[in-house]
Structure formats: structure tokens, C-alpha cells
């Protein structure tokens, strides 16, 4: 962590740029997970046995783990349901209901 | 019992009839990358810097919402429909793409009160074509290549080229480089991508291999 006001190192500059771009692209944001807001993001997968049936189960994982389940250099574009965590004010979940 | 998420490819039977209820324009996190911001700027007749300042939450790169949870552009309908972001065009699908060219389309469950109707009298590819997603898909793919190079650069040694062009603000990046801002959004984004790759070259970030994008186009190695 550089001192406030000091120039960023090459590595920190690259990480910061990657984090900013990852957010907009919906890419795994592990490199941007330097703050609480990003660390609180989760992905929730729900699994269905029948198209019109109830969810049989779900898997909710933080982005950090989701990165390990998917290719790090991939991305996902989807409308996410946005929840607000009362304590942090900006936690987001991600629901995919597969039919 | 096997519980598997059902995923689609481009040839999967799929259709969706939207009835404009607007429920999918509420309480959603809609991410916008550089291309989406440039398309919004085009529709709004303003600069990407202005769009980012006024309509995008910088902490999440998502469109701002009203106090009631509506998308900032929802006004009984989409006020920027010709420039709506990719996730809005895809809905109720989501698109996950990997660097090796593999991809899946995930289907979201609609709001229980939504009058939207899903069907099977078309294909995913046909739906995407009807929503004119191709330029957005290509841009996502090309900016993902930039992201991949940024990450590769973190792990590789190289010279320090100083501050990068803005990675999110197309017009600002061109202005910082002293370049004119083309009127055509595709040309603007093309120059932005070139500036980013020039900077990555200067930083010694390795070029990366990416498969061609399935929607077609000119994407190849590190471009």
C-alpha cells in the first residue's frame, strides 16, 4: 500500500485499471476486491428440477470463489437483482434461475 | 436426482415476448462498460464523461437508480432504448463468455407478475439478432482482451509507462491523448482500444490468445 499521495507502482496501476474495467464488463473482480464493497458481492445459483417447479437448491458463493469455478478471463452479462444490505448499504446478490 | 442449471447455446429454441411492464427496469444492477457508456452518450447527445458523472455509480459501474429503485433511464419506458445496455437487450437471458471462446446463455426467471412470455418458436441466436446485441458482444469481447492483458501485466515484469488512458471513459481517454473525438461511436471505441493496447505494450503486458468471438467480427489475438 503506497503512502497517500505517492505515485502508484506499475503493478498497482495495472491492478487499479483492471478492477475498474472488470466492474463494467461483469468480469470476475478478484483483482478489484481490495475493498469491502466488492468483497460483499455474491453469486447465487438456483437449481430447478422442473421449469415451473420450486427451486430445488441453490449455491451462493462470493465472487472470489466464483472466480475459481469459472474461467478467470471470462465475464458474464446479466441483469442482477440488487439487494441492499442494511449494515453496509451496498451488498449485491446475483440470482440465476435456470429453467 | 441431478440438479443442473439449464444453459442455452445460440441454437437452443428460445423466444421471448416483452409486454413492456417495466419490472425488469427496477431493482436491477445493470453494469455498463466503456462501449455501453459510449452508446448511451450517443443517444443522449453528450460525452461519455457526462454520462459517467450523471448516470453511473462509480463504485459499482452500474446505472444509478431512483429512490423507488427504477433505472435512472426508466420513464414509463426506456428513455434510451436505442442505446440500452447489453444486459437489457439480453433479458431474460444472461451471457457468460470465456476466453477460450466457450459461452453459455442463462435464463432468468421473470418477475412473477410479469406478462412477458417465453416460448420456443425461435432460437437464442434469433433473439439476440432481434435485440441487435452483436456490436455489444464484440465490444465486450475486445475489452475483455484488454482486461486479460492488464491482469497478465500484473504478473509480468515490465517498464512503468505512467498513468494509463482512462479505461472506462472513452472520450476522456481520447482527450488526454490529444486526439479528436470521432462522431461515430464505433470509431471512438476503436481508438480507445488502440490507446489501451498501446499503453499495455509500453507496460510490457503480454499479448494474450483469445478465440474468435462467436458473434463474428475481427477479434483475434489481443485485440
Image (cartoon, coloured by chain):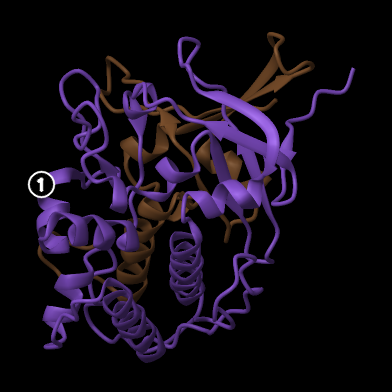
Chain colours: A brown, B purple
Residue that badge 1 annotates: B54
Q: Residue at x 67, y 27 (%)?
A: A98
**Residue A80 appears at what percent x and percent y?**
44, 32
Horizontally, residue A5 falls left or right of residue B84, namely left
User: Tag 1, which secondary structure?
Assistant: helix
Horizontally, residue B177 falls left or right of residue B25, namely left
Q: Is residue A1 visible?
A: no
* Front-most of residues B120 and A67: B120
Q: Is residue B12 above or below residue B200?
A: above
Farthest residue to the right: give it: B1
Q: Find residue A51 and report its image quarter.
A: top right
Q: Chain of mark 1?
A: B
**Residue A60 appears at what percent x and percent y?**
59, 25
User: In which quadrant of the rendered image does the N terminus of chain B lie?
Assistant: top right
Q: Is residue B57 above or below residue A25?
A: above
Q: Is residue B142 above or below residue A73?
A: below
Q: Residue at x 36, y 53 (%)?
A: A24
Q: Find residue B70 and report its image quarter.
A: top left
Horizontally, residue B40 falls left or right of residue A10, namely left
**Residue B141 appears at what percent x and percent y?**
51, 66
Q: Is residue B143 visible?
A: yes
Horizontally, residue B145 falls left or right of residue B70, namely right
* Front-most of residues B96 and B87: B87
Please give the count of numbered marks on the rendered protein: 1
**Residue B147 appears at what percent x and percent y?**
45, 67
Label 1 CA crowd tier, 10 Å (few <14, some 14–19, many 20+) = few
Q: Residue at x 36, y 49 (%)?
A: B85
Amino acid at each position: 500500500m503506497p503512502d497517500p499521495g505517492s505515485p502508484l507502482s506499475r503493478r498497482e496501476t495495472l491492478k487499479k485499471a483492471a478492477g475498474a474495467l472488470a466492474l463494467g464488463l461483469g468480469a470476475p473482480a478478484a483483482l478489484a476486491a481490495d475493498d469491502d464493497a466488492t468483497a460483499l458481492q455474491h453469486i447465487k445459483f438456483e437449481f430447478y428440477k422442473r421449469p415451473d417447479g420450486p427451486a430445488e437448491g441453490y449455491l451462493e458463493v462470493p465472487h472470489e470463489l466464483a472466480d475459481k469455478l469459472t474461467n478467470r478471463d471470462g465475464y458474464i452479462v446479466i441483469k442482477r437483482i440488487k439487494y441492499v444490505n442494511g449494515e453496509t448499504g451496498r451488498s449485491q446478490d446475483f440470482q440465476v434461475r435456470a429453467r | 436426482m441431478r440438479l443442473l442449471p439449464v444453459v442455452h447455446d445460440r441454437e437452443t429454441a428460445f423466444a421471448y415476448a416483452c409486454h413492456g411492464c417495466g419490472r425488469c427496469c427496477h431493482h436491477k444492477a445493470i453494469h455498463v462498460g466503456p462501449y455501453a457508456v459510449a452508446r448511451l452518450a450517443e443517444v443522449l447527445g453528450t460525452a461519455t464523461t457526462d454520462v459517467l458523472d450523471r448516470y453511473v455509480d462509480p463504485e459499482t459501474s452500474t446505472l444509478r437508480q431512483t429512490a423507488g429503485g427504477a433505472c435512472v433511464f426508466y420513464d414509463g419506458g426506456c428513455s434510451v432504448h436505442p442505446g440500452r445496455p447489453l444486459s437489457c437487450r439480453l433479458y431474460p437471458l444472461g451471457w457468460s463468455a470465456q476466453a477460450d471462446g466457450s459461452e453459455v446463455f442463462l435464463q432468468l426467471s421473470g418477475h412473477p407478475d410479469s406478462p412477458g412470455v417465453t416460448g420456443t418458436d425461435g432460437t437464442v441466436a434469433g433473439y439476440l439478432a432481434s435485440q441487435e446485441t452483436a456490436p455489444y458482444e464484440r465490444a465486450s469481447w475486445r475489452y475483455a482482451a484488454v482486461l486479460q492483458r492488464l491482469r497478465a501485466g500484473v504478473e509480468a515484469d515490465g517498464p512503468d509507462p505512467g498513468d494509463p488512458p482512462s479505461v472506462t471513459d472513452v472520450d476522456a481517454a481520447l482527450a488526454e491523448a490529444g486526439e479528436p473525438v470521432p462522431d461515430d461511436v464505433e470509431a471512438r471505441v476503436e481508438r480507445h482500444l488502440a490507446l489501451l493496447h498501446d499503453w499495455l505494450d509500453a507496460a510490457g503486458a503480454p499479448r494474450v490468445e483469445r478465440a474468435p468471438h462467436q458473434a463474428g467480427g475481427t477479434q483475434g489475438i489481443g485485440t
